[in-house]
Image (spheres, rainbow, N blue to C red):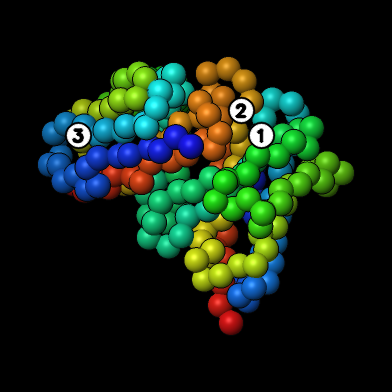
Amino acid sequence: QMRLQESGPGLVKPAETLSLTCSVSGDSIDDSGYYWGWIRQPPGRGLELVGVVYATGTTYYSPSLKGRISISLNTSKNQFSLKLTSVTAADTAMFYCVRHPSRGALFGVVDRWGQGTLVTVSS
Amino acid sequence: EIVMTQSPATLTVSPGERATLSCRASQSVSGKLAWYQQKPGQAPRLLIYGASTRATGVPARFSGTGSGTEFTLTISSLQSEDSAVYYCQQSNDWPWGFGGGTMVEI
């Protein structure tokens, strides 16, 4: 059974860097059939795609976060990670790690979700 | 960047009635449109992809239609467990953005 599990600090200070890791089980992140990504959801608000990384390491980021965001693969641990720099209170959100098929009718759709981890930006 | 707009923001429907949710894209997404259901405290769940294909295990009362820029999610004969927020998402062009959501209240 394929599973995604987020981990990382639940509290980050303003101007610091938010770092999260997603551990993948039941699938291999170097499988070319998928993109691996992050979606965030501020409290009481909608979903925002943060960015994705492909099995080759190619990344695509949200234009609104470009310059502050980095997503990378760690194939030896079957994990992928998110770093968001210079955070403010506006970055407070539930962060979900997700899987997007890279081909066929399900291209770009989120077919697997982690349970989510709440990150609060506060001093 | 393709902007996804959902309407209405909130829909109140009685049990057994039909709910019709709309999603409009600012430019054509060529049928690459998905719908998700999110209940409080849970991650979203994929309902529909390719505008009209139900995901595995999704009840037949959920159906999707549309093409180009106009899409509809219909929930026929609403049940109490369908109370949730519904999001559309396009995957035709990066960034694969979401609509703002429609809350369905029963």
Chain letter belonging to callout 1: A
Q: Which of B95 and B41 is in front in this view?
A: B95
From where the camera sits, is residue B6 visible?
A: yes
Residue shown at 83% from the left, 41% from the top: A75
Q: Distance between the residues labelled 1 and 3?
A: 33 Å
Left/right placement of residue A106 relative to residue B102 reads right
| Amino acid type, mark 3 | Ala
Mark 1: give few (<14), some (14-19) or many (20+) Cα within 10 Å. many
Chain letter belonging to callout 3: B
Query: Which residue is labeled 1 in the image?
Result: A35
Residue shown at 57% from the left, 66% from the top: A119
| Amino acid type, mark 1 | Tyr
Residue shown at 43% from the left, 40% from the top: B98
Query: Which residue is labeled 2 in the image?
Result: A101
Chain letter belonging to callout 2: A
- Up/down of B48 relative to B12, above or below: above
Residue shown at 58% from the left, 82% from the top: A123
- Up/down of A24 relative to A18, above or below: above
Question: What label sits on residue A60 in the rendered view?
Answer: none
Secondary structure beneath label 3: strand
